[in-house]
Structures are given as C-alpha cells and as structure tokens.
Image (spheres, grey):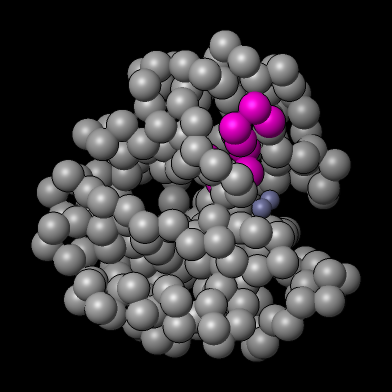
Amino acid sequence: MLKFESFIFNPFSENTYVVYAESGECVIIDPGCGTPNEENQLFGFIDSHRLKPLMAINTHGHIDHILGNAAVKKRYGIPVAAHPNVKGDFQRSLQQSQLFGMSFNGECELPDRDLKDGEIIKVGESTLEVICTPGHAEGSISLYAEIEGWVFTGDALFCRSIGRTDFPGGSYETLRNSIKERLFHLPDDTEVLSGHGESTTIFDERKYNMFL
Ligand SMILES: [Zn+2]
Ligand SMILES: [Zn+2]
C-alpha cells in the first residue's frame, strides 16, 4: 500500500503530494514549491524518510503546479512527466509567473517524459494509472491509485467545485465530460485528492457538486 504526504505551497495554496511505497520509491505530484523554505519542507520530508524519487508528475501545466519542477530535477536528477498537450501552458509559464509576480528562476523546461491515457506508473508494488481529464487545461491528467482508492485530480475536480475553464485551452464542456465520463466511473469511496483545498470522495461529488 502506498502512503502520501501533502504540502500547501506558493501564493495559490497549491497541493503538492509525495506518494511513496514501503520500498522508499516515490513520485512527486505537482511540485509547487517556490521558495527555499518550501523546498526545504519538501526535500526535508523526502530525505528524512529516505525516499527515492522516481519522477515528478505534473497534472497540468499551470505555473502553480510546475513552479518547483526545476528544483526537484536539480535535487534528485529525476525526469518530469506530463501529458504532451501541456506544452502550450509550459511555454506560457514564464509569462504567467511574471503576471502573478512570482519568482520563477530558470527556464520553463518542457517535460522530459510523455504520459498517455491508460499508462500505468509503478511505485513500489502499487500503481498509478493516468486518466486524461482535460477541460481546465490542455493535457490535464488525473492519477488513479486503484489499490489505495485514491485519485489525484489536479484542478479538474475539487471538493464541491470544479476547475476554472476561462484560461487558454479551457472548456467547460470538455471538463464536464472528463469528470462525468472518467472520474465519476471510479468507485464511490475513491478519495479525491485535488490540486487545491480539501479532499472529498467520488460519491460526495457525484451527489453534491453543483457545478456539474
Ligand atoms: Zn490549474
Ligand atoms: Zn492550480
């Protein structure tokens, strides 16, 4: 069974997750650390638990989710993986960060590894399955840990809310389809771990989410 630790980083209160196995293998979902203090929190956790990061995974290409990519790559020498359709947002990331007055050092390097729908990422004895959930941004993915009953949804689905669709590449219809056709088919008790805010379950969102 996997475990995870979550962190709240950067001015957007973005959730960064470290998902780790008993073997020590881990992946970092949406490294949003943007200051030395935030980097210390993330690296301190990983190092004190003697974890071995395999890769960072971006659920999508918005600045608050990719801000720490360069830092984790530098620290652990790991690839960053994302869906190929995130490229436009990555290319706009420097611009985005300047717009929001955030410090974003270095290049907004494109991801090193492409993830496709249905792809299985092994972490120890467990797996994360890539589920394409575009609509909030192009190339948005969710990551489903079937054994653990978790789904990391990035900014597609939140507790009683959904992602904004007014950014470049956003579409309400597409997002609604992603949630209804992909996420809502997951088991009722699946815990939804979002890119912002608290966790929820598939059952509760199917029942109480007013945006769908
Ligand atoms: Zn976003
Ligand atoms: Zn976000």
What residue appears at the point 22 percent right and 72 percent down from the top-left corner?
49
Q: Quadrant of residue 177?
A: top right
* Residue 210 visible within the image: yes
User: Relative to 162, is 70 on the left or the right?
Assistant: left
The image position of residue 142, as x and y in percent, is: 48, 40
What residue appears at the point 61 percent right and 58 percent down from the top-left corner?
14
Q: Quadrant of the N terminus?
A: top left
Any magenta on residue 14?
no
User: Relative to 23, is 110 on the left or the right?
Assistant: right
Which of 66/150 is in front? Answer: 150
User: Relative to 56, is 32 on the left or the right?
Assistant: right
The magenta-colored residue range is: 153-161
The image position of residue 11, as x and y in percent, is: 72, 66
The image position of residue 69, as x and y in percent, is: 53, 73
Q: Quadrant of the C terminus?
A: top right
What residue appears at the point 59 percent right and 32 percent down from the top-left corner?
159
